[in-house]
Amino acid sequence: MSADIHTIAVHEAGHAVMRWIRRLPITAVWADEEDGLCEGCGKPIDAETNLLLTLAGFATEADYMLLPERVNLAESDGDDFDSAWRILHHSPHLRNEGESTEGALMRWMILAGHTLYPYRELVERLGFALAQRRHLSARSVSAIIREWCKRNEPDPTDPVEEGENLRALNVALVKREEAA
């Protein structure tokens, strides 16, 4: 198993876990040494969810955005970043007043990382299985998630587990950044 396949597999696992967190249907994932794919469900989703799903893979690669200063958006590329830029361009309500698209992208990427952080073990487990098998059906992804849930108690202080709107989390994050 090469390092490249593991990075790609964990990236795709980040997308898959974010789908589960956002209560979307579980779908199949694919990975090889050059590319990966987390299948969609063919149904429209809101722009906020779409942006979080799109950025989830890169957030896992950036250590769940614990050190956002390590991310250089100017040098980042790829289909996910292109999609994220388009979503932000076409959904101005996802940007704060006066906020640049780059600033909004970083803020949403941090939110994606912080949303996934409590599930990092699940992301790693799913990524490891994907790197080994190269393809996981939706049923296999669901089985790995169910197994993880049996061994891990949900955190009652986690707003995602409580079902709160992630927009509230986003607002708290912005306030914390402004206070710093």
Image: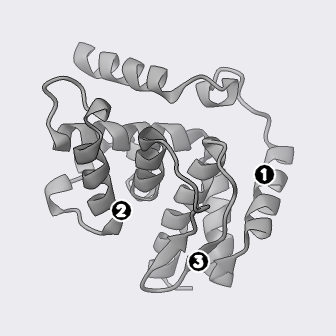
Q: Is residue 82 above or below residue 88?
A: below
Residue tagged 2: 80
Spatial CA span between label 3 and label 2: 15 Å
Q: Give the position of the C terminus as an image quadrant.
A: top left
Label 1 or label 2, whichever comes before in sequence order: 2
Secondary structure of the residue carrying numbered label 3: strand
Task: Give the number of the disc on residue 30.
Answer: 3
State the scheme by which the image is colored: one colour
Residue 14: x and y in percent read: 54, 57
Say which amino acid is labelled 3: Trp
Q: With 31 as the anchor, is 52 left or right in this view?
A: left
Kind of residue at disc 2? Asp
Residue occupying the point 52% across, 85% down = 32
Q: Neighbour class for label 2 at 10 Å: few (<14), some, many (≥20)?
A: some
At label 1, counting other C-alpha atoms closer than 10 Å, the crowd grade (few under 14, some 14-19, many 20 or more) is some
Quarter the N terminus occupies: bottom right
Q: Is residue 153 visible?
A: yes
In this view of the protein, can residue 3 be seen by the observer? no
Q: Is residue 130 left or right of residue 168?
A: right
Residue name at image x 18 percent, y 44 percent: 102
The amino acid type, in three-letter code, at marker 1 is Trp
**Side of 163 where 107 appears, left or right:** left
Q: Which sits in the foreground, 106 or 82? A: 82
Circle 1 or circle 3, nearest the eye: 3
Q: Nearer the viewer, mark 1 or mark 2?
A: 2
Q: Looking at the image, is 91 positioned above or below residue 16? A: above
Answer with the quarter of the image where residue 28 lies: bottom right
Q: Position of residue 100 (x, y in %)?
A: 14, 37
Q: Residues within 10 Å of mark 3 (few under 14, many from 20)?
A: many
Circle 1 residue: 148
Asked if marks 1 and 2 touch (Cβ < 8 Å), the reply is no
Residue at 47% across, 20% down: 168
